[in-house]
Image (spheres, rainbow, N blue to C red):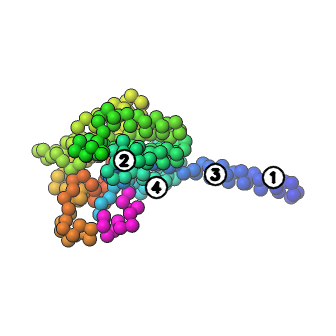
Amino acid sequence: MGRTRLIALLLFGLLVGFRQIADKRIVRVFLIGDSTVADYTIYDDYKTKRYPITGWGQVFQAFMSSDSLIKVRNIIKADSVLVIDSARGGRSTRTFFEEGRWASVYQSLKPNDVILIQFGHNDAAKDKPERYVTVQGYKEYLRLYVNQAREKGAIPILLTPVNRNYPWADGKLTSVHGEYPDAVKQVAKELNVRLIDLTQLSCDFFTSKGQEYVTGHYFMNLPAGAFEAYPNGQKDNTHFQPEGAIEVARLVFGALQGI
């Protein structure tokens, strides 16, 4: 074989290899939101001071396995996904923006990245003015996140806030979030954005499991002495134990398949 032909074949092989790598590109899935979405393993004292608190975003990567991605080809056309959980506890749509957290995400966004947006718990906290955002303000910040994500060629998806473990009545859990879930739906319709109604999905799923099971297994209601971080126990019907976080992440992944 002549030297020229050999070089040509080698170059062709390299080109094919580069194309195969490009075809197997990694799509990044960004998560922005509050404590119900956050990853607590970023803290050095997680095992001793925080565990078992778990945000659903903390366990979402497990649902993005190569075997599962075929189910969400409607959104993610790639062989692998990297989940980047930028959610933080105590943040509303406004404070997430004001602290520069959105700027950091925005600067990182690339075409075909996916961004899941779930706020509401802290926006509705009228008793905490440092977090509180009116419904109209909430909608404005959601519009900002959607429009700026699209500027970067990313795919925004709006989520209504996951429900708390109340109020229960006659064995059924109903929404505790007032006007905020409808505000998300209105923005989604207005801007033609994909929507996951996680408020309703979580209410329905938790209802199917029953109040007793959900309270003891999904939310941070802990007996005294069971966990190092909570020697006196805990009563918390907002944040999740690992089992609850996994089930909420499963709801989100399931919903992605149909939007």
Q: Earlier in the sequence, mark 1 or mark 4?
A: 1
- Are dots 3 and 2 in contact, CB under 8 Å? no
Q: Which residues are magenta?
A: 39-50
Q: Secondary structure at mark 1?
A: helix
Given residues 68 and 239, the one toward you in this image is 239
Q: Which residue is mark 2?
A: 33
Q: Secondary structure at mark 4?
A: loop
Q: Which residue is mark 4?
A: 65
Q: Earlier in the sequence, mark 2 or mark 1?
A: 1
Q: Is residue 42 visible?
A: yes
Q: Residues within 10 Å of mark 3 (few under 14, many from 20)?
A: few
Q: Which residue is mark 1?
A: 8
3 to 111, vertically: above or below: below
Q: CA distance from mark 2 to mark 4?
A: 23 Å
Indicate the quadrant where residue 53 lies: bottom left
Q: Which residue is mark 3?
A: 20
Relative image position of residue 181 (x, y in whole percent): 29, 37
Given residues 13 and 126, the one toward you in this image is 126
The amino acid sitting under disc 3 is Gln
The amino acid sitting under disc 4 is Ser
Indicate the quadrant where residue 10 lies: bottom right
